[in-house]
Amino acid sequence: MSEKISIAAIGTDESISIYNCVGFKTYFSSNLKEIDREIFNLYKSGCKIIYVTEYIYENIPETLEKYRNIGIMAHID
């Protein structure tokens, strides 16, 4: 049975691993295409909230626009 993910955090390095302590599923990548694909996979699997670091937020405007009306994206500093 696959794990149900309700909240996730995406960053370019392990600095977001602290979010594992509070129940977030975390993903690390510096490849923006991989991040776009991971956001899509999280969305399709029913993830309700996806936090992204400021760097990612600033560098994926097309991805953000796709999901803007759905209300699943937020950025963290």
Image: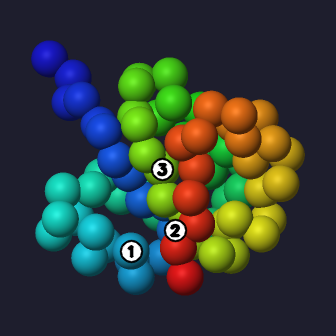
Residue closest to the eye, 30 or 57:
57
In the image, taking residue 10 as reference, residue 17 lies left or right, namely left
Task: Indicate the position of residue 1 as horizontal and vertical percent values.
Answer: 14, 17
Q: Nearer the viewer, mark 2 or mark 3?
A: 3
Residue at (83, 54) in percent of width and height: 61
Q: Circle 3 sits on which residue? A: 50
Residue closest to the eye, 75 or 9:
75
Task: Indicate the position of residue 17 as horizontal and vertical percent values.
Answer: 31, 72
Task: Indicate the position of residue 25 as horizontal and vertical percent values.
Answer: 30, 52
Amino acid type of the residue that numbered disc 1 sits on in the rendered structure: Ile
Task: Indicate the position of residue 47 as horizontal and vertical percent values.
Answer: 40, 34
Q: In the rendered structure, are the residues bearing label 2 and label 1 in contact, judged by CB atoms less than 8 Å apart?
A: yes
First-in-chain label (2 vs 1): 2
First-in-chain label (3 vs 1): 1
Amino acid type of the residue that numbered disc 2 sits on in the rendered structure: Gly
Compared with 30, 41 (above or below) is: above
Compared with 32, 33 (above or below) is: above
Q: In the rendered structure, are the residues bearing label 3 and label 1 in contact, judged by CB atoms less than 8 Å apart?
A: no
Q: Circle 1 sits on which residue? A: 16
